[in-house]
C-alpha cells in the first residue's frame, strides 16, 4: 500500500499504517493503533541476521476541548481511513 498522509486539525497520520482508531472519552483523545513493523538485526548469540517484529505504541491526539469536537474529528478520520482502504484494499 502506498502511504497516504491524512491531516486533521492538529494531527497527521499515515493511513497505510493504521490498524485501529479508537476514542478515549476520559481524556477526550483519539487513539491510533499502528501496524507492527519489521526490522532486521544481528542476533548476538548466533551472529546471524534475523527479522524482529516491533509492535508500535498507540499514538494519541492532543485532548480536545469537548466530546463533540473529538467525535467530529473521529468521524472525519474514520471516513478518510475507510476511503483509503477501499481504494487500496
Image: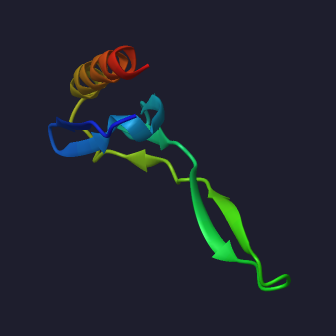
Please name the residue shown 37% across and 22% down the image. 88
Q: Residue at x 68, y 62 (%)?
A: 51
Q: Position of residue 27 (x, y in %)?
A: 39, 41
Height in image: 73 above or below 13? above
- Tell me: residue 84, above or below residue 39: above
In the displayed structure image, the side of residue 67 where residue 86 appears, left or right: right
- 8 to the left or right of 78: left
For the image shown, how many numbered marks are present on the structure? Answer: 0
Q: Position of residue 69 (x, y in %)?
A: 21, 26
Q: Is residue 17 left or right of 73 when viewed as pictured?
A: right
Residue lying farthest to the front in this orientation: 48
Whole-percent x and y of residue 59? 42, 49
Furthest residue toward right:
45
**Residue 1, picture quadrant:** top left
Which color mode does the image show? rainbow
**Residue found 85% across the figure and 82% down from its top:** 46
Please state which of residues 86 and 10 is positioned toward the viewer in this rendering. 86
Residue farthest to the left, as pictured: 9
Residue in the foreground of this view, choosing between 30 and 8: 8
Left or right: residue 55 versus residue 61 is right
Residue 28, horizontal then vertical, whole percent = 34, 36
- For residue 89, which quarter of the picture? top left
Image height of 63 relative to 49, above or below: above
Amino acid at each position: 500500500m502506498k502511504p497516504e498522509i491524512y491531516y486533521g486539525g492538529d494531527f497527521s497520520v499515515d493511513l497505510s499504517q493504521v490498524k485501529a482508531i479508537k476514542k478515549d472519552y476520559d481524556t477526550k483523545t483519539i487513539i491510533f493503533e499502528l501496524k507492527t513493523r519489521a526490522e532486521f538485526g544481528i542476533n548476538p548469540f548466533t551472529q546471524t541476521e534475523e527479522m524482529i517484529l516491533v509492535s508500535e505504541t498507540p499514538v494519541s491526539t492532543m485532548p480536545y476541548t469537548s466530546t463533540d469536537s473529538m467525535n467530529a474529528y473521529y468521524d472525519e478520520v474514520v471516513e478518510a481511513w475507510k476511503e483509503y482502504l477501499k481504494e487500496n484494499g
